[in-house]
Amino acid sequence: MPPNKATEAGLARQRAGFDWSKIVLNLVLPVAGVLVALLVGGIMLLVLKANPIVAYAAMISGAAGSLSGVTQSLVKATPLLLVGLGICIAFRANVINIGGEGQIILGAILATWFPLTFNRWPGWLLIPATLMLGFLAGAAWGFVPGILKARLKVNEILSTIMMNAIALQFMYLLIRGPLMDPAGVANGTFLAQSAALPRQAWLPRLVPQTTLHAGAILAVILAVAVYFFLWRTTIGYRIRAVGLNPDASRHSGINVAFYQALSLTLAGGFAGLAGAIEIMGVQHRLLDGITGGYGFTGIVAALLGSLHPLGVIPASIIFGGLLVGANEMQRSVQVPSSLINVILGMVVLFVSGSAIWSRRWAAQRKLGETQEEQVEP
Amino acid sequence: MNKLLSLGVLVKILTTMVPFAAPFLYAAIGETFSQTSGVVNLGVDGIMLLSAYAAFYTVLNTGNLWLGLLVAALVGLLMGLLMSFISVTLKAEQGISGIGLYMFGLGLSSLLFETTIGTVKTVNGFQPVKIPVLANIPVIGPILFQNSVPVYGAFLLVPIAWWVLEKTTLGLKIKSVGQNPAAADTLGINVDRMRYFSVCLGSALAGLAGASLSIALVNLFQENLTAGMGFIAVALVYFGGWNPWGVLGGALLFSAANSFQLWVQVLGIKVPSDVAVMLPYLLTIAALTVTVNRARQPAALNKPFERGES
């Protein structure tokens, strides 16, 4: 079978959509990965002389036991979902974007500078303009490694990591200098943070007395949009083709380097948007730790969602809950919340390790199909 | 600016550069073995963190520096086994499993630090050992021959690694499974076993990299002590064209840029320190764009091997 046809067949199978057994597999493996990780985490809790059942119960009640817990979980899920959507696009093109942290920072920087500078604009104009700018800033930060990969074949994993470090220092430079809160300069505290955004640039709250903001809805809408983009548009089709089989794509006239650079740029854009939304919806000012590690945990959310935009929605909500619950666990059983990073790391290891079973299963099916074809006259 | 260019300052920059190249050397030479066999281990930073903690904790409680080194290497080895199992046996996408290993190491080292040590403490790490005669040479002596044992070890590792990779059957086998695993398999080389060996060796060296930081250079441990040094080490392998001597050049260059920015800050020269801190990273990106040795890249890098796959 010529490679082009293999790609066509692969894409056709993906296009077919409602392949129940595949959906079940994509559901079972990540869930099993999380459960095993929580199990090992439980053993660690035992070693740390904490009761795992009490700890996990505290985690669940912290995340889902109250209105504030639920809304906080959704607030944390929002940047995870946005970063995860970008990761989906990049990974579908077989490009690994580790640059989420830097891209979030760039989006956050622009989303701070712009409303502070154009503070007389009305909200209906300022909010969309700022969101757009955040997206573009992140996209620019993703474009650099993208173009370096396309033109000079620079490994994107390494360049995105370097871009993270550069973005972080750039942010420090700004919040200790030009963007430093004038109030902090005036009263002599010199806190390394920017001034608060003008009120009309704050994202509207969805539930009174909670932190849940309109960014959460935007993220879900974008998840559906990314799904349509990847599965219903020519560009999306080509991005997936490039990821499935670059050689075949090249032979059928697809500019592989271009689509890889494009996917990194888009991934950067979504991370940048996540940064802008963190500023406009949660912190309302630029300060250290603005990324919240979402650049990395967004990768985990995307993996758990089987790199499917709609799958990332529940995955990021679960993760948002884990992050919120970890704080409650720290309070109730005095186990540092860094345990959650250990668990997240194990989830990535287990889920990436379990991909072998879905590949084997796909290979067996393919073999079955070929035999069926041969039976026909 | 004139202050910076005086001979005295230049010597100071070089005296910082040599010892601080050591962690990069251990980690990057280790990664060279791993990548030569076809496995990108992106979890180096996580391994360094966990080993740095383990070495520090051992020394804090026993005062035995050599035991600290040994424990760090063992922790590295265990992490290497985990990485090999996921990436070689289970054939995971290496970029992703490496990130998992990094997060695991980062999280576990913070967790253990918070539960067993709590606050930042210091230990008496490895002391500089003057090499007789050579240490007395003006200028060069203090730069090169007044370092601690782990630092000498890092520089000795370069020729040893080169010799193993280029001149021994073992090196040939490692290269063959990284270049053409199918052919190596036909010749009766156990591809998986060679890759396990290379990844574990590389990870044990990453363990020493962490230990060199926490019990020989800065002599303390804190959360995220390495601050991404392991990722730089991975970049150095590409920069060095999968050749230990190239890696040495990269490590020295990066370390020089790093100590340059440190001294810029110390001397209070009017460059914003944040810009100076960016310098090594900008340099690394620039270096990656001009690396011409790409022809040496192992052909099967990042590709899991499965028998019967064409």
Image (cartoon, rainbow, N blue to C red):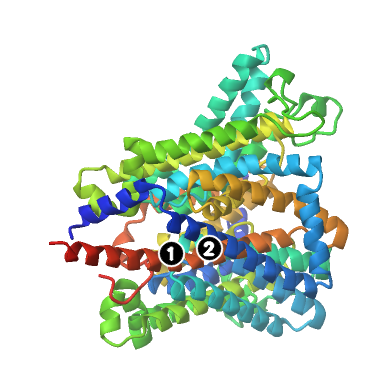
Residue A163, image x, y percentages: 52, 45
Q: Which residue is mark 1?
A: A358
User: The disc labelled 2 sits on which kind of residue?
Assistant: Leu
Which residue appears farthest toward the left when viewing the image?
Answer: A377
In this orientation, which residue lies closer to the viewer: B213 or A34? A34
User: The disc labelled 1 sits on which kind of residue?
Assistant: Ser
| Vertical placement of residue A281 versus A152, above or below | above
Q: Is residue A304 visible?
A: yes
Element type at mark 1: helix
CB of mark 2 within 8 Å of CB of mark 1?
yes
Q: Give a yes or no on whether discs 2 and 1 share a subunit.
A: yes
> Along the horizontal axis of the image, is A221 left or right of A339?
left
Which residue is depicted at the point 29% across and 66% down? A368
Residue A317, image x, y percentages: 65, 46
Q: Quadrant of the N terminus of chain A?
A: bottom left
In this orientation, which residue lies closer to the viewer: B133 or A106? A106
| Vertical placement of residue A348 versus A65, above or below | below
Tell me the number on the disc at residue B222.
Answer: none
Q: Which residue is mark 2?
A: A29
- Distance between mark 2 and mark 1 Cα atoms: 8 Å
| Mark nearer the N terminus (2 vs 1) | 2
Which residue is depicted at the point 54% across and 26% down? A133
Alpha-carbon neighbours of circle 2 within 10 Å: few (<14), some, or many (≥20)? many
| Vertical placement of residue A114 versus A322, above or below | above
Toward which corner of the image does residue B46 lie, by quadrant?
A: bottom right
Residue B39, image x, y percentages: 43, 69
